[in-house]
Amino acid sequence: MVGILGSTMDGSYEPIAEIAAELDALQARTGLDIPIHVDGASGANGRAVSRA
């Protein structure tokens, strides 16, 4: 699973915490452990700074 944290064009992001929670719930139900990678284009830096 790949989530996007900060697009290059507008800095928009996907709900990473909610995606991770759903993957955790899936693992609890089925035993499947699906890794998550959070990809951050240049917009991710602005998101990280704004949350600090």
Image (cartoon, helix red, strand yellow):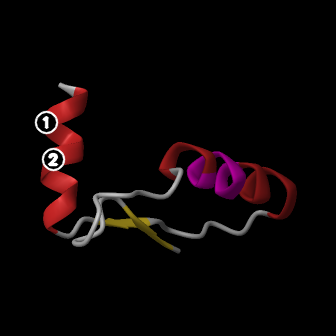
Q: Residue 16 location, x and y as percent? A: 49, 51
Magenta stretch: give its range.
19-24
Residue situated in front as seen by the camera: 3 or 10: 10
Q: Please, is residue 14 above or below residue 51 in the view?
A: below
Q: Is 48 situated left or right of 14 in this image?
A: left
- Residue extending furthest toward the front: 10
Residue at 62% across, 46% down: 18
Q: Residue at x 20, y 70 (%)?
A: 41
Expressed as whole percent of the image width and height from the top left, the position of residue 49 reads 13, 36
Q: What residue does disc 2 label?
A: 46
Q: Secondary structure at mark 1?
A: helix
User: Which amino acid type corresponds to the residue marked 2 in the rendered image?
Assistant: Gly
The residue that disc 1 covers is 49
Name the amino acid, label 1: Val
Q: Looking at the image, which is closer to me, 43 or 32? A: 43
Q: Is residue 31 magenta?
A: no
